Amino acid sequence: MPKTINTATDIECVGTKPKIIKEFFGRVNSKTEEVSIAKMQSPIGWSEPGQTPEFDEYTVVLKGCLQVETKSEVLKIKAGQAIKTNKGEWIKYSTPEEDTEYIAVCLPAFSPDTVHRDE
């Protein structure tokens, strides 16, 4: 049976500035462990600690530019572009250049216990 999501749940975020996370599907809003889907609104100058997650993350940038840092390179993902990051690989997200909006899909669903952020 289809499941309609009428509203997203605001999720507290980690980082240097407040970022708005609206979870549509995931462990909090829909009690879904298989996948999480959230819309992010990140202000210019936001950055979060690096992480080595236990999930793959698919990100589609809707507006602005998301900076994605790996151990070997720094990528700038602009509006209309997308990126997939892999579980078990270190990654760091930030928005140093402009306010940015993006959709993040995590398989399995995001969890504070499985993101493994740097200290």
Image (cartoon, rainbow, N blue to C red):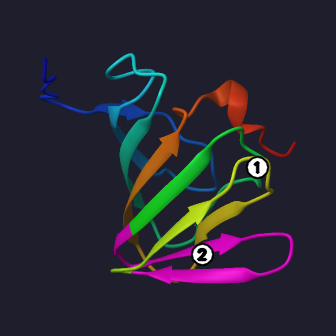
Which residue shows up at 40% across the image and 70% down it?
Answer: 100
- Earlier-in-chain disc, 1 versus 2: 1
In this view, the residue in front, 16 or 78, is 78
Question: Which residue has dot 1 on it?
Answer: 51
Residue pictured at 34% horizontal, 32% vertical: 25
- Which quadrant would residue 69 be assigned to in this image? bottom right
Query: Badge 2 is on which residue?
Result: 67
Q: Secondary structure at mark 2?
A: strand
Q: Quadrant of residue 32?
A: top left
Query: The magenta stretch spans which residues?
Result: 61-78
Assign the N terminus to one quadrant of the image. Answer: top left
Quote the CA–CA distance across marks 1 and 2: 14 Å
Is 1 covered by the magenta stretch? no
Residue 67, image x, y percentages:
60, 75
Q: Secondary structure at mark 1?
A: loop
Which x, y percent locates residue 117? 77, 42
Q: Nearer the viewer, residue 107 or 80?
A: 107
